[in-house]
Image: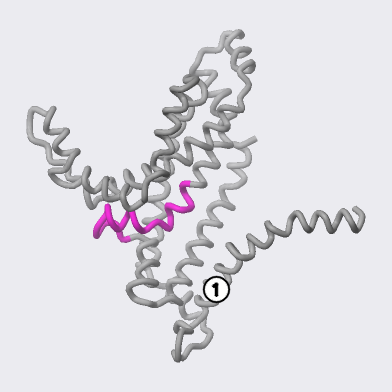
Amino acid sequence: MTGTERLRTLGLLAPAYVWLTVAVFLPLSAMAFFSLLTDVSFGDRDWSFTLANYTQALTNPTYAILLWKSLRLAFWVTVWCVILGFPCAYILARMIKGRSREALFLLVILPFWSNALVRVFSWAIVLRGNGVLDRAVNAVSPWEVKLNLMFSETAMVIGLVHSYLPYVILTTYLSLQAIDDTVIEAARSLGARFPRILWRLILPLAMPGLIAGAVLVFVPVVGSFMEPRLLGGRVGTTYGTLIEDQFVAVFNWPLGAALSFILLAVVLLILAAASPALRRAAT
């Protein structure tokens, strides 16, 4: 590569590097700085460097329990998003054409058009005791039913699945759209029935989209705090709400930053450990 070509390449890549520096490395560097302080460095507060925040975060068993609870919640939300998202994506990509597909596509991305708070409080109205869901069930049930799903893990999962399901549908839809129809026709002409075609052909070819969608769901749900706090109540105390409390309620930014970095490290370790299996599934 000549000097001119190298300069042109650097010029083309410069906006991406500037964006990464401003949007990713700068906030993370500030967070890492705060995680090593004894107190926030605002005003005339006394502060110094320490590792006590990481020691406290790693030795307190309550924090470990909340982290496990958040990982378990993210796992189940991801599983439900995959279970519900794949059929929706398949119907959109392979079974519906024309304006009907456009209309269904609008319904899929409809959650993105509304504010997250509106979505969560709407679910609160539906799931609370004597709410919309209770009334609907009792309208058709011969005996009185009291569901009252509010302030439970079920309510948290419902709210989070509703918020993140479109990611799985959209990424899987793109993978299913890329499948050549002639491949499926060839399998069908050789005598393969639909369940076999689905299991041996369509599902493996759609796996990259499913995996991408699962990662897009799992990573943010681990640190989510709004849906667990509003829909879970006392049950909704998670690692994400713990971090939020340190920043907002307790004003202990150094401990909150340390907890955030531990969460980031755990998620990266999980993704790194699962990457060989995910890579095999995607190829």
Q: Is residue 4 above or below residue 56?
A: above
Residue 48 visible in the shown view: yes
Q: In the rendering, at what x and y percent does residue 127 appear?
A: 22, 44
Amino acid of disc 1: Ala
Which residue shows up at 51% across the image and 61% down it? 264
Q: Residues within 10 Å of mark 1 (few under 14, many from 20)?
A: few
Which residue shows up at 51% across the image and 56% down it? 267
Which residue shows up at 25% across the image and 50% down it? 152
Q: Nearer the viewer, residue 250 or 99?
A: 99
Q: Nearer the viewer, residue 69 or 165?
A: 165
Q: Is residue 233 above or below residue 129?
A: below
Residue 84 visible in the shown view: no
- Magenta segment's dominant SS is helix
**Which residue bears the numbered disc 1?**
30
Q: In the rendering, at what x and y percent does residue 77 appear?
A: 39, 45
Q: Which residues are drawn in magenta?
A: 217-237
